[in-house]
Image (tube, rainbow, N blue to C red):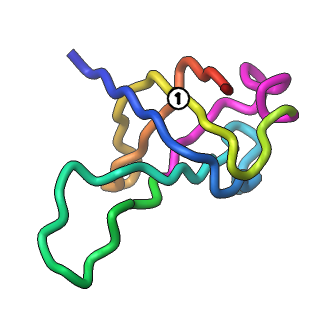
Amino acid sequence: MNFIAIIGIVKGLMKGKTNEYDVLKVKVDKPFIEKDCEDWYELIDVNLDSAIFKREIKSIKNGAIVGIKGRISQKDNQMLLIGERLQVY
């Protein structure tokens, strides 16, 4: 099963290089910190289909909490996270 679930804080929205996807930067907590100097969060890029999420993309603001359900995809030997459902809180 190819399934991801992410809950985090919006840190930015970038228009994709193609009109197909916009990239949502989400700040998520790490489950553990390996070193004292390491940050407690990571920034994750999630690709959102521009046509499907048109209404949600307009309402997303920096600092908003979002829940994302999606899948992992591979393109040109690069792993991509593709959002299939999005809830803005």
Q: Residue 3: x, y in percent?
A: 30, 21
Q: Residue 37: x, y in percent?
A: 25, 84
Q: Residue 62: x, y in percent?
A: 73, 52
Q: Quadrant of residue 86?
A: top right
Residue at x 50%, y 53% (from the top left corner): 27
Please indicate whether residue 25 sits to the left or right of residue 17 in the image.
left
Quick one: label 1, few (<14), some, or many (20+) residues within 10 Å? many
Q: Quadrant of the C terminus?
A: top right
Q: Quadrant of residue 5?
A: top left
Residue at mark 1: 83
Element type at marker 1? Answer: strand
Circle count: 1
Image: magenta residue range? 45-58
Residue at x 64%, y 56% (from the top left corner): 11
Residue closest to the far left: 34
Residue at x 14%, y 78% (from the top left corner): 35
Question: Is residue 60 highlighted in magenta?
Answer: no
